[in-house]
Each structure stands twice: as C-alpha cells, then as structure tokens.
Amino acid sequence: MTLRFFKKQVSKIPSADFQPVKISVLLGAAAFFAGVVSAGTPEQPVIFADQGPEWTPQLRAVYYSQDQGSQLIPFAWLKALRQASGEPFVQGALTRYGYLPNPSSTNADTLPVGFSLADSQQGPMAGMTCSACHTREIKIDSVSYRIDGGPAFADFQSFVVDLDAAVLRALASAEAFQSFAEAVLGNGAQKPEAVTALRDSVALWSLRFHTLISRSVPADKPWGPARLDAIAMIYNRLNGLDLGAPPAYLLADNMAAGDAPARYPYLWYAGRQDKTQWGGWAANGTDGLALARNLGQVIGVFAAFHPGPKTAATVLDRDYLSANSANIAGLAMAEGVLNRLAAPKWPFPVDRTLAEQGRDVFNRPAGPAGGCAECHAETEGEIRPPDIHTWKTSVVDTGTDSRQWQVVLRSAKTGSLEGATVPGIVGPLKATDLSLNILKAAVTGTLVEIQAAQGAGAAPASTITHKEMDDTMRAPMMPVKMDPKPPKDTAAPQGTFIYEARVLKGVWAAAPYLHNGSVASLAELLKPAAERAKEFKVGPVYDTKAVGLAAAQDTAFTLKTTGCEDRASGNSHCGHEYGTQLPDGDKKALLEYLKTL
C-alpha cells in the first residue's frame, strides 16, 4: 500500500451519511468514528471553527485519536496511577493540563484529544498524537471556540513532570506498589511473582522516563502552556533512550536541558510549504517528505525505537525495524486527513472597508513602515518531482531569539549507531556526531528498510510501506549550512539565526507569536521590540481587538521574556521589526486584514 492510497481512502470519506470504516490492524487501535463530535456543556458551550467544507466531524474524530506509534505508558498503569492528593491521575481526562475533551473517544473520561491507544505486548498502550499539541480552544465571553490544527494551550511540561512523580510514588513503598498492582492486575495481584514482574517492568520504565524528564525539563525556566522545546525532546528521547545497551538503552549524558521552547506551529496547509520546522531546515512538500517529518515527530513523542545490528533481512548496516513501534500507516493516514483541514475562518464581524486598506499595507515593500507579502504571501515555491507545486517558505534572520539554533546543532554520542550509513544521505556516523545526523539516520534508515521489506514482500508487523519516497531518499531534513557554534551575542552575522516565515492564513488563531511564543498578540508584534510586554499571562482568553491573548487569563502561568539585550535566552521577544513604524490607522487596518486570511 502507498501513502497515496491512504490519502485516497481519506478523500472518499463523505461529509454526511458516514459509516465506520474498518482499517487494517496495522493502524493499531485506531478506527474511524461515526457521529458528530460534540464538546462543552450548556454552561460552557464550545463552537467548532469553520475550517472548510471538507473538514467533517468524522475526519476530526480520526485526527483526535489516530494511533501513530507513540507508546508512552501501558493504559492499565496510567489508569492505576494516583495524584499526590490520592485522586486518579487521569481524573478529568487530563484537562487540568490544558488538554481538551474528546467525546468521540471510547475512553472520553480518561483520554483527551491527542491521546491514542494501540496494541502492545503489555496490553493497550497509551500514546500521544499530533493533535494533542495542535488543537486549541480560545475563549471569548465564556464561549469556547475549538480550532483544529491550532497551537494547543496544553502544558506538556507539567503533564510529564507529574506523570514521572506519580510513577515514583507508586514505587516508593511496598504498600503503595501493592495498591497500584491490585489496580493493574486485579486478582493476579495475589500472586507474588506477578507483582514482582510488574514492579520490575514499572521500575525500568521509571528509570528511563525519570532520566529523560529530569534532564530535559528546565525547572528554573518553565515552558508553560502553549510551548515545548520539541527539538530538545526529540534529540533527548532518541539519543538518550534508544542508543545505549539493553535493557535500559540509556545514554544519559546525551540529554541536555530543553531551554529553547517554541510555540506549537499551526498545521493547516503545513504540507504545502517547501520547507518546514521553525528553523526551515527540513525539505517539505511531498508525500515522502511529509512521512519523514511525521516519523521524526513520533520518535519524539515516545515511540519505541532501538536500532540493532545488521541481520540477514536488512539492506542497511543496521536493523531499524525489529524494535520500532512507528505506525507508518497511521502517520500516512494523519497526513491525508490534515490535507483536508483549512485555516479557521474569523468567527466575528469584519470591517471590510478597513480590511481592504489593510491589504494595501500588507502588500507594501517590507520594512518598518509595513509590508508582509515579501515573506508571508502565497507565492510559488520549489517544484517537487514529478510536478508538485508548493508555497515558498521564506527562511530569514529577522533578529528573533537565537537559542533554538544552538539546540538544533547539538552533538551526541552515537552509541549503537556509530558507523551507521544510509548511502547518499548520511554517515558513516562518527562516535560523536550532530544530533541532526543521528535523527536523519533513524528516520531515513527506517524508511529505506520499510521500502526494502515491501520489495521482499515481508512488511514488518507494526508498519506498512509505500513507494513514494524518492524525494525523502534524496533530501530529507537537509541542514542549513551554518557555523556549528554560532555566536550568542546580538551582533551575530546577518543570516546566522534563520527561521521560517509561513503563509499567514489563519494567523489570527495562532497567538502567542514569534517562533518562541514571546509576543502575546499581533498588536503587540507591531510595536518596536523595546516597547513589547516583558511578561504576560498565557492562556485561551482571547482579545479580538489586539488579535491575540487577552491580558487577563484563567491560568496562573506568566511568561517572562527578555529583550534584545539577551537574544539567546530562549524567551527573547526581540526582532521582527516589520510594521512597527506604521501610523496607528495603518496598524489597525493591517490587523483587520489579517483576520480575513
């Protein structure tokens, strides 16, 4: 089967009279759900944003729960864990962390949007999908508007820190573990050997997870809601949890603090860019490149992956598939579903006359006096073989926070991948190499072996294959040529710290702004950096006038930023001085126009 096959299957799903479709068991526990997704209560209604006629409740349900290969924790363990208060850890379906209710789930009381279930040797395995971080609600006058594909207000850091602590509590004493074991094993907890086996399994899980979280999460500079250092988490999970010796597979010294948090990007039209990732270092625009992008993502959100020595069945010098939970079918399905997701329409009245004036401001030459089209308009990008047209993704240094590039270019010990080569793409990997090269080997090695397995007629059980990977094999995740140790000071050469500038369709729904989420609203972004707020609360309450986060929020988290005096802080609101010198009337018009995109 091919990625195109799955996209064709998705395209056949009608907007009405939908019937559940049984997908191959290769999709794990995922299935299409019938019925209309509803959310909220009469006291707190939820309105789903208009995201185009092709975005149906049925596709939304698939997007919310589709297994992609993440194996965070056995579902039975998750349900058995307790908060410090003694209440179930899954109480309220984790909505206290900003995750959103998922009424279409058969476990709606336990798992929110973006959490999946898949079969494993340990029973149903709870995992995370892209929708956990890319579904949001904004609130206006006590009404919530659900925006699919939008950057979530989820607090991933608090979730994983608390999950780590919950497991440690279960292991803290014989009494605590017996209670946990009874919840997991039922009558089986009367057998001492079963409890001992469970404890050994939980202890190994905890060793790995606690090492990852304690070394990745910066306690002194919390990410807060709506942000995550995804690059550091992907690197730390792959380099730190996958490449060592069994049974723990740990290389703890390969992990470093995730101190360059980024705002979750929005996903509508993501597949149309010719480059992607915040730093613009990944080629994009084809099915194969999308699969490489998504495979890297699922490695970062707890897919099981342990590359081993070459076997008689492998074509490369490593075995990338035997211990690999990535659900290629699920990743392909998710991409096909998202290709039908449009940017959300502004749900409120628009002053059309003012918006037309704003269009003129948008199309001026770029500079302090206006002009957005040069970087953000919908223009022709690179044409990918055979004849795939993309949108140009400008990748420029606009003076914004530089810390992410210092994370992107980190190095690590290659462990079990030392010497590994994917011909024409990467390698042989040195004993210590760029983490980006290690990730390239993991992703492309997996895809090459899948392609070979298909050719041999022996696809691995957890994945299926496709033949549309030519672009992926030629140019996946090509790093931008840069000084591997870029300077920290603000006088760095122009072009050193480059980031993508996307087409701005639906940008009104993506606050906070800049790649690191350091600016609360579009109105704030039109101020010179020196005048932008040094701190603001992060949460879903929305300001329609400022087009972004309201000053008063229901959440307690306050993001404290730095200015241009500390551009490498990870939280700098410096840069992007475009439109900052506009007259107030032009700024107002531009904001009105941006609501219409």
Image (cartoon, rainbow, N blue to C red):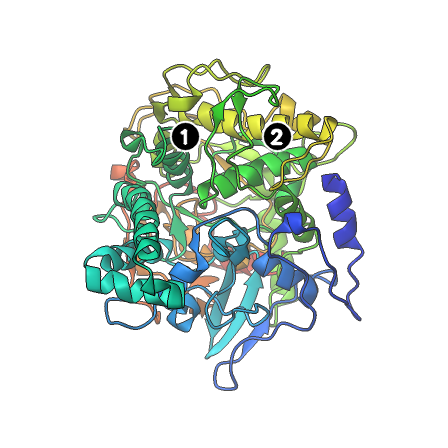
Furthest residue in direction left, as rendered: 173
Secondary structure at badge 1 equals: loop
Which image quarter holds the N terminus?
top right
Which residue is pictured at 39% across the width and 38% down the height?
Answer: 237
Vertical relation: 402 (above or below) 358: above
Q: Which mark is residue 465?
A: none
Front position in the image: 595 or 161: 161
Vertical relation: 388 (above or below) 196: above
Front position in the image: 405 or 473: 473
Q: Where is mark 2, residue-wise?
A: 447
Residue type, label 1: Phe
Say whether residue 507 is left or right of residue 468: left
Tell me if mark 1 has few (under 14), some (14-19) or many (20+) residues whose alpha carbon lies within 10 angstroms of its own.
Answer: many
Q: CA distance from mark 2 to mark 1?
A: 30 Å
Which image quarter holds the C terminus?
bottom right
Which residue is pictured at 48% across the width and 13% down the height?
Answer: 428
Residue 419 pos. (x, y %):
45, 14
Furthest residue in direction bottom, as rendered: 42
Vertical relation: 249 (above or below) 340: above
Secondary structure at badge 2 equals: helix
Q: Which image quadrant is residue 595 in?
A: bottom right
Q: Which mark is residue 497?
A: 1
Residue 286 pos. (x, y %):
69, 35
Residue type, label 2: Leu
